[in-house]
Image (cartoon, rainbow, N blue to C red):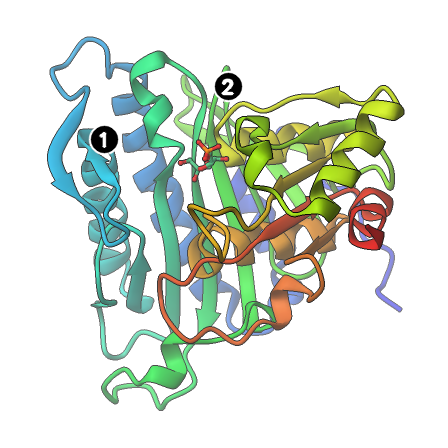
Amino acid sequence: MEASRIAIPIGTALDRFIKNNQDQFQYASGELSQLLRDIALASKVVNREVNKAGLIDIMGAMGSQNSGGEQQQKLDVLANIRFTRALAKGGEACALISEETESYVDLNNDGNYVIAIDPLDGSSNIDVNVSIGTIFSIYRRKSKEGMPIQELDILQRGAEQVAAGYILYGSSTMMVYTTGHGVNGFTYESTLGEYVLSHPDMKMPIDGNIYSINEGLANTFSPSIKSYLEFCKGNNYSARYIGSLVADFHRNMLKGGIYLYPATIKNPSGKLRLMYECNALAFIAEQAGGKATDGTNRILEILPRDLHQRTPFFVGSKNMVEKAESF
Ligand code: P6P
């Protein structure tokens, strides 16, 4: 039974919050503070670039492609550089797995953590001024400190995450993260240059009536998904799909709802990536009382075979995910 925690006041800065909760992190809290500080720092720079994207000529595609063959937007590449640099400088990370790079990136051999990141998810929305996000997972390395990185450090199940979070560059910029002791949300206060606690102990409503899915793909869904969508419509649920996973996930976290990206003809294993999109959000969802599966298996139990492997993804309010699975 955890000692009753003294409620940490709204407005507490992220660093102070981590220090006040240091007994909740199973390893040295200084290492977690440093990692989250590195990620927060990079996100502040990305936030500034996202907010000025229209003004500086960094809009539009680079003309290059990422590991999944997806068109790279200039801000994707810039964000990847910012997060990679911040984590390399911070010294705590030994390796980085990113949507933007084919293989993992060696950072510091004496670092104890492996980071998996989607530096800027929803990037197709950058040019149309719709919210976008960063998604990150933090793992403890399995191999000995100082030794070269091995596959067992890189291909870890989501259940092995020691922390995970996302940054939402929306009408306000927020960082939401968990270390396995609940979920807390911080809003960026740009005049202070600080993330401050705004959503302590976030809980996902156990039920809801919002469903998020790209119904333009409906003809390629399986009969069970089609039946579930009919169920949603029959119950007058609201369809809300921003086309930006972090934004849809965050709204469903606050209001209750389910996000579904099932297998389709174009993406028979689903479109979303296990290592740097689904695992982090699955960890957060479960910590907030929600659920995340691939339709049958718990996302956090899937043993990755490949850095960029895709998975069908059903995440959100517990009762809604279970209902969807029952179809
Ligand atoms: P579709 C963005 O590219 C993304 O990875 C998620 O942020 C978003 O929910 C999904 O893909 C949108 O995909 O096929 O509906 O355009």
Closest to the observer: 99 or 190? 99
Element type at mark 2:
loop
Does residue 33 appear in the picture of this structure?
no
**Closer to the observer: label 2 or label 1?**
1
Assess mark 2: CB under 8 A from ligand 1? Answer: no
Label 2 sits on residue: 172
Q: Distance between the residues labelled 2 and 1?
A: 18 Å
Q: Hey, which quadrant is residue 320 in on the image?
A: top right
How many circles with numbers are drawn on the protein? 2
The answer to which quarter of the image holds residue 214 is top right
Of callouts 2 and 1, the N-terminal one: 1
Q: Residue 270 carries which label?
A: none
Question: In the image, is the residue at mark 1 within 8 Å of ligand 1 by its beta carbon?
Answer: no
Where is residue 90, by image quadrant?
bottom left
Residue that extends furthest to the top in the rendered view of this protein: 55
Characterize the local packing of mark 1: few (<14), some (14-19) or many (20 or more) Cα atoms within 10 angstroms. many
- Of 27 and 67, nearer the camera is 67
> For this view, does 122 lie left or right of residue 160?
left
Residue at 87% in and 46% down: 319
Answer whether labels 2 and 1 touch (C-beta < 8 Å): no
- Percent across and percent down for residue 308 are 36, 61
The residue under the point 25% across, 23% down is: 49
- What secondary structure is marked by label 1? helix
Image height of 237 relative to 305, above or below: above
Picture quadrant of ligand 1: top left
**Is 190 placed above or below 277 here?**
above
Instruction: In the rendered view, tell whether residue 202 sits above or below residue 73.
Output: below
Q: Position of residue 233 (x, y in %)?
A: 81, 24
Residue 189, x across and y down, in percent: 48, 22
Tag 1 residue:
75
